[in-house]
Every structure is written in structure tokens, then in C-alpha cells.
Image (cartoon, grey):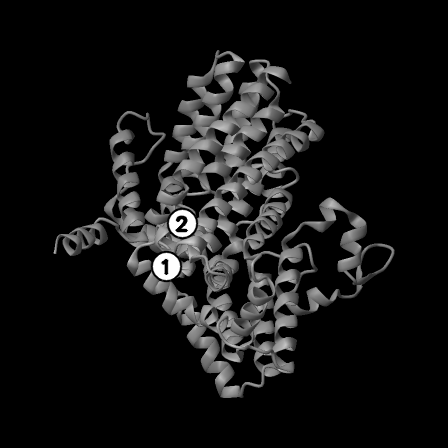
Amino acid sequence: MRTMTETAKKKRGMPSSFTILLLLLAIVAVITVVISGTSGGAVTAARPSDFFTAPVKGFADALPVCLFVMILGGFLGMMTETGALDNGIAVLVKKLHGREIMLVPVLMLIFSLGGTTYGMCEETVPFYALLAATMMAAGFDPLVGAATVLLGAGCGCLGSTVNPFAVGAAVDALTGVGIEVNQTIIIGLGLVLWAVTTLISIAFVMNYAKKVKADKGSTILSMQELKDAEEAHGAAAAEVTKDVKLTGRQKAVLGIFAFTFVVMIVGFIPLADLNAGVAGFFDNGVYDAEGNVITQAWSAVVTGLPIGQWYFDEASTWFFVMAIIIGIVGGLSEKKIVDTFITGAADMMSVVLIIALARGISVLMAATGLDVYVLDAAANALAGLSGVIFAPMSFLVYFGLSFLIPSTSGMATVSMPIMGPLAAELGFAPEVMVMIFSAAIGVVNLFTPTSGAIMGGLALAKIEWTTWLKFALKLIVVLTIVCAVILTIACVMI
């Protein structure tokens, strides 16, 4: 009886993601009211209407991402209906029999490369459900799948090298205020941060995965989370115990599935900024001497923009088209294709609402001026400090600010014109300040509930945010200390 009571208390003590986000929204609103009277007009007190409309405005602000997630749901639903996804996972796991643990380092490295090169974040959302099912089939738990995606891509963003949404936006903001930046220093420091944090995270996830593989009771997931994960991803895991063979149609569907994701990833990478030759290979349009389009690139015919210039509207269009193609190749009837797509999109509504609510917090802070007010106050407090103190204190400032502004490009645009000149005035390299910003927001975006990508991805994997925090907290502390030490040394030496 005592065990049942303790279990009930434990369940009541773990609020859902919706509750956590609503509480954060209320706290932010109260803070604006408290500060408004002493801010000299810099912060406007949030009205009740601001609080109640924030989730709706957040939905409007995050509409491209929300639509992308819904269409993704239809796409994954189509894959499941053909049977190709479940059978494909089963075949993969059987081929890796005894070596399933190698999925973790290989996939984390791939995701981290996406993070450091082009800021792979929201684009990882589709992989949470896929890897949760894959890791369950491999004998782990869905948390291993979520950690592989989140920590892999997250450490890549933390150690950004040429990521246009982080270091690119920061350098552009500094150039706008007349500060020249050495890209070689940024890339070198980014590589150090990326390599160290990625290796630490891989070791952390592999250690947990081995424990779960050896003893299922060592999972930190609650009974409810395991039940939800089994309902969502158990079918794929169950296929591993059967003698599964892929049909010709299913092999074709899996080929299309892989092609779809590869094109999506490449579509988001700003190829023209990285390498003109590579961009030309993917953008196979024909142009005249003045650059006018004679024949559109195949991507532009489908989505309106060539590969390398995509964002969520183009990705949504791509997944929508490929979902229909998969349904046809998979042998589904017209009615089945329509019904499956609608059902898959409907299954994503809870994820969509979480993303919208998380974005609503950022919308409220921007509307009241709280984000800029806190930034100005922090910059004033840092003036006159030595390098040994300035670097870790700047890191902590950005750490706190990242909860207010989870967008890397938004943070760079708002903060760099203030923090960059401050560093230069005190005699410190602005390149180090760029990486302080990148590392701090990178660490915070490993767990902040104001990130729609995190909350949405965890919801897809059927993992509560409180469970994720419990799992990742020790690692986050270690990564914070490691980053602060590396950046402090860089600030003193460069």
C-alpha cells in the first residue's frame, strides 16, 4: 500500500509540459509588472490580455514550425501504414545484433555535424519519434533516442563553426557596429568546444544506454512514460522478435523515405554561403549571363526555392509531396492515403500546442521589453572586469538571457551590438564573445522549456520535460563548467 501511495504522489509531483509552460508564462508576466515601475519605461507591465493572448500569438509566430510538424505527422503516418518503417527498423536492429550501442556515437556525431555547420535544431523534430522507436527496438528506452538527437545536435550548435544562425548572425551584428571579426579564430574555438562537448555527451549517453540494455529496471522513465512510449513506438520494437522481410514495395518506400530526409537536411544548409560549386551541383537551374532564370532548379519547381534556401514552408511542401508519393508507391488506395495523412497530422496536435505555448513566452517578453532590459542591465554590470572574471560572468549572463531569448539568431541580433563593443572596449577579443554567446545559448538549449523544438521533440518521444531534466542535469553542469573554462582561457590568451 505504501508503494502505491508513493507512486501516486510521484505522478502528482510531475507536472506536464503544458503546466510547466503556463507557469513560466505567468511568472514572466508577474516579473514585468514588478519591474515596470522601476525600469524608467523600458519594461511595460503585462496586462491580463497580454497573458491570455500570448499562446495564441505564439502560435501565429510559430505557425511555419507548427504546420511543418503537422505535415510531418501525416508523412510518418503514411510510412507506418505501408509497414516499411517498422520492418525497416527491425531489419536494421537485427543486422546490428550485439553492436546496437554503436547507433549512439554514429548518430550523435552526424547530428552534431549538422548543428555546428548549419544550426540543426527545429529540423531534428522528425527524428525524435523515429529514433525513440529504433532505440526501443534495439533494447534501450526512448530516452536514449531523444538524447541521441537532442545532445548530438545541441553540442553541435554549442560549438558552432560556420552556423549561419549563430556565429553568422553574431558576426553580421558586429560588422554592423563597425567591429571586424577574424573568422579563423571563431572556427578554431568552435571546433574545440564542439569536439570536447560532443565526446563528453556521447560517453554520457552510451553509459546510460548500456545500463538500460543490461537491466530494463535502470531506466529513469516513469511507468506512465513507458506505457505511452509502448503505445506510440512499441509496434516497431515488437517486429524485432519476428522473422521480418522487406517486400519490394517496402524497400522502395524506405529508399524514398531516406531520400526525403537527406534532401530536407541539404535544403536547409546555406550552400551558396559555404561553397558555390556545391551549391551549383544541387541547384541545377539554367541561368543566362545576367543571372536570370532560364530553367528553374527542380527544387524550385516543387517548393518555389532552390536547394540551400529552404525554410519551414519549403520543408513542409516537400514532406507533403513525398507523403503522397510514399502512399502511392506503398500501394495505398486514394481514400487510405487521405485518411492516413489526416490521422497522422491529428496525432501531432499536442506537440503543436506545446510549441505554440513555448513560443508565447518569448512573444510576451519581447512585447513588454523585458528581454532587452535584462540585457542592458547585465552589460552594465560587466563593465570594468578582468578577463578571468569577465569571461565566466559573460557566459553566465548569456546563460540567463537564453531563457528569455531561446532563438540563436534573435539573441545575436539583440545582444551582439551591446556585448561585442563592451568586450572590445575592455581589450578582449570580440571573437571570444561570439563563442561565449554560442556556447551559453547552446547549453541552455539542451534543456530550456521555452524551446519549441525541445518540448515538441520530447513530446514526440513520449518523455516529460521533468524526466529529461533529471536525466541531463549532471551532464549540463559538466558541459557548463567545461565551456566556461575553455572560454576563460581563450579570453585571457587571445
Could you tell me residue 248's position as x and y percent?
65, 81
Residue 373 in the image: x percent, y percent?
Answer: 39, 29
Rendered view: 341 above or below 442: below
Q: Which of the 4 image quadrants contains residue 311?
A: bottom right
Give percent across and percent down for residue 353. Answer: 37, 59
In the image, is residue 218 above or below residue 27?
below
**Count of numbered circles on the image:** 2
Q: Work out which quarter of the rendered image holds the C terminus and state it.
A: top right
The reply to whether residue 387 is in sight is: yes
Amino acid type at circle 1 is Leu
- Residue at 50% from the left image edge and 31% from the top image edge: 415
Of the residues under marks 1 and 2, which one precedes in the sequence?
Answer: 1
Seen as rendered, the residue at the extreme left is 1
Q: Which of 227 and 21 is in front in this view?
A: 227
Q: Distance between the residues labelled 1 and 2?
A: 10 Å
Mark 2 secondary-structure assignment: helix
* Residue 176 location, quadrant: top right
29 to the left or right of 409: left
Viewer-nearest residue: 385 or 80: 80
- Which label belongs to residue 353? 1
Residue bearing the label numbered 2: 359
Whether residue 61 is visible to the viewer of this picture, yes or no, is no
Of 140 and 29, the residue lying toward us: 140
